[in-house]
Image: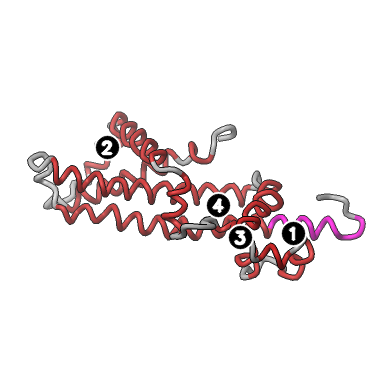
Amino acid sequence: MAGLSLKTQNTAPLTLLVLLQLLAVHGFNSASFDINLLTSIKEAGGVMLAIGVLASWLSYLLPTGLKNTLIFLRLRNVLPGHRFIQLAEADPRIDAQLLKEKVPGYESLSSDHKAQNSYWYREFYRPVSAQDEVASTHKSYLLYRDAATVSLLCAAIFVLAKLLLTESMSAFELVSGAVFPLAALGFALAAGHAGCRLVTTAVAIRMAKLALASQPGDASA
C-alpha cells in the first residue's frame, strides 16, 4: 500500500472496530443474536461504505492536539516524544550510557520536554520512519487513537439520539450505549502503549545503527 498515508491505510480496520461496537449495541438490545446478521452486513457493501465514511469523518472531527490530550491525559508536553529520554532509559533494548554519549546536552535536554520532542522527531524518528517496525507501531498508534476518539463521539451521538429521538430510539436501552465509552477506554490504553512503543522503537533502531556505524571499518550511518 505504498503511497497511502498510515491514516488512510487504517480506514478498513477503523471501520471494522466501529462495526463491532454497533453489533455489540445491537446484540445488547436483542433477545437473541442472529449470526446471519454478520453475513447480511458483509453482503451490504453500501452499509460498510457508509460506516467507513462516517468513521473517517468522525476521526477528522477532533483536532490532533485534542486527540493526543485525550489519549495521554496531559495538557502540556502531551506526546511520548516529550519524554523520550525518560522512556528510553527504562527500555531494556536501549543502551542508556551510549544514549548519553550520542545526545548532545543530554542532562539539560532531559529537563526540557519541548526540546526533547523536537530532538526525538529530528534525530531519531525521521531517519528510521520508513523502517517496518517503526511504521507498523506508528500505524497502530494512529488506529487506536482514532478508534478511541471515534468511540467517544459515537457515545455522544447515541446519547443525543436517545434524548432527542425518543420514539425512533425506543428499541435501544440507554445503558447499551456504554459499549462506546468502554471501547474508547480500551482503545485509549492501547494507543498510549503504542505511542510510547513508537518512541522507544525509533530510538532503539537509530541507536543500533549509530553503534554499528561507530565500529572500526564500518562507514554506514
- Within the magenta stretch, is there residue 211? yes
- Within the magenta stretch, is there residue 152? no
| Mark 1 lies on residue | 208
The circle on residue 76 is: none
Residue 178 rendering spot, x and y as whole percentages: 24, 56
Residues at circles 1 and 3 in contact by the CB criterion of under 8 Å: no
Say which element carries label 2.
helix
Name the residue at 27% across, 37% down. 41
| Mark 3 lies on residue | 113
Q: Compared to 217, does 161 lie above or below? A: above
Q: Quadrant of residue 110?
A: bottom right
Residue 128 rendering spot, x and y as whole percentages: 68, 48
Give how far apart the Cα atoms at labels 4 and 2 are: 30 Å
The circle on residue 137 is: 4
* Residue stretch in magenta: 205-217
Say which element carries label 1.
helix
Tell me the quarter of the image containing the N terminus. top right
Residue 196 rendering spot, x and y as whole percentages: 55, 59
| Mark 2 lies on residue | 41
